Amino acid sequence: MSWKRNSLRFFLVSWCLGVLVSLSGCGYTTKTILPNNIKTIHVDIFKNSIDITKEISAGDNYEVYRPNLEVDLRDALVSRIFMDGHLKSADKDSADAVLEGEILEYRKDPLRYQHEVAEEYRISLVCSIKLIDSATSKVLVEQVNVTGDATYFTTGALQETETQALNDAMSDLARRIVNRIVENW
């Protein structure tokens, strides 16, 4: 009879512990890490610091320049902020915070060759960011070398243009920047 009582106690204790663990959750939250006064954000057009004058050898990665890249990146960021929903976009004069940044690199790295011709590339867009509280001028978030990237094929069924891949890389970069600002991921 005592082994039944001990088994029942063990079962009840195990069940209660299981319920407590499941109710405690994993710590994930959808609340922003920003101060409570930050509800709106203005995204400045990032400074384009890509050095298009440096000499590239055939063995190096390709440095690429694209006109209006900084405007397209700003648009991708504003879109991502809207989709995320934690912050609202605002003009610079009324925003609680301002996101500034600098485009440091735009690379096109060959990944796969067939018959000495590159058939797959990785596009990488590298930036530095700074989120500044408009009221206090305090830097809330700062990070260098935030990278967004995408791969694309130049032939075959998965063929894409470099422009499509760059748009994917900008979307990836915008996601990473907004996640860094909002959730510190």
Image: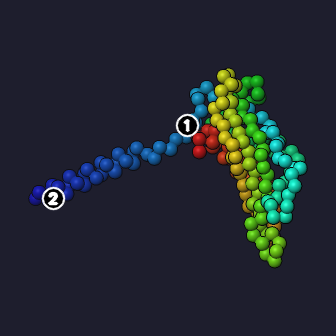
Viewer-nearest residue: 36 or 131:
131
Disc 2: which residue: 4
Residue 120 appearing in the image: yes
Look at label 1 and name its amino acid: Lys
Task: Quote the CA–CA distance across marks 2 and 1.
Answer: 47 Å
Question: Closer to the camera, 78 or 105?
Answer: 105
- Which picture quadrant has residue 5? bottom left
Left or right, 86 with reference to 67: left
Q: In the depicted view, which residue is nearer to us: 124 or 53?
A: 53
Q: Which mark is residue 140?
A: none
Where does the image place residue 162, in percent across and percent down from the top left? Answer: 82, 59
The numbered disc on residue 31 is 1
Can residue 160 be seen in the rendering of this structure?
Answer: no
Note whether 1 is above or below 83 in the view shown.
Answer: below
Say whether residue 10 is left or right of residue 163: left
The quadrant where residue 88 appears: top right
Q: Amino acid at mark 2?
A: Lys
Q: Determine whether the residue tagged by mark 2 lies in a helix, strand or loop.
A: helix
Q: Quadrant of the N terminus?
A: bottom left
The picture places residue 37, in percent across and down from the top left corner, at 61, 26
Give me the residue at 81% from left, 64% from top.
59
Q: Residue at x 80, y 61 (%)?
A: 60
Residue 101 position in % (x across, y down): 75, 38
